[in-house]
Image (cartoon, helix red, strand yellow):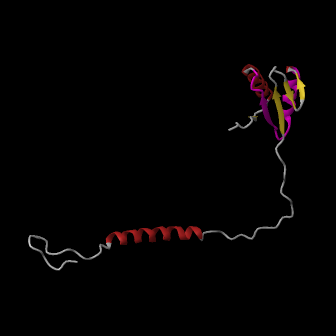
Amino acid sequence: MSMGPLEGDSEEGLMNEINMTPLVDVMLVLLIIFLVTIPVMNNAVKVDLPQASTQPLDQKPAFVDVSIQADGTIVWDKTPVDDTALATQVETAAKQEPQPEVHLRADKDVRYERVAQFMAAAENGGLTKIGFVTDPAKK
């Protein structure tokens, strides 16, 4: 508030009103946002769904545990197998419906070449889902 011009002031007085333009702009933007979102929230189609007495399937996906020991021995579901028996096991598993997942546990000291050989045999046999199992790192 100004009591009048002081000596040396070239202004005729200070403006003591609030500028309402930014407030009105913000309120208009909020109004538009609300007008756009309210119909979307109320646009649900009401449908009377039929009742069913079936129980949901609690079927877990099948999986095969494969371990490769440090000496290169492959263990298929707790049974040691050689390369020819491995190819037979892979083909049998690939024909199952749904196809089981392979959980591969490789010893940290096993040669990478042996892991790659198993993965190639699994792919050639038709298995497509292979997961690597590791132990969590100790902190």
In the image, the segment drawn in magenta is 84-110
Q: Quadrant of residue 91?
A: top right
Residue at left offset 39%, top offset 68%? 26
Q: Would residue 36 appear left or right of 18 to someone viewing this image?
A: right
Residue at left offset 82%, top offset 41%? 98
- The correct choice, above or below, for 88 with respect to 40 in the image is above
Q: Quadrant of residue 20?
A: bottom left
Q: Would residue 13 appear left or right of 74 to someone viewing this image?
A: left
Give how far across and how far down residue 121 sits, in percent: 79, 24
Q: Quadrant of the N terminus?
A: bottom left
- The correct choice, above or below, for 51 with respect to 5 in the image is above
The outermost residue toward the front is: 139
59 and 134: which is toward the camera? 134
Residue at left offset 77%, top offset 27%? 107
- The correct choice, above or below, for 9 with respect to 127 in the image is below
Give how far across and how far down residue 23 sits, in percent: 36, 71
Give how far across and how far down residue 127 sits, in percent: 79, 32
Residue at left offset 68%, top offset 71%? 46
Give how far across and how far down residue 115 sits, in percent: 75, 24
The outermost residue toward the right is: 79
Q: Quadrant of residue 114?
A: top right
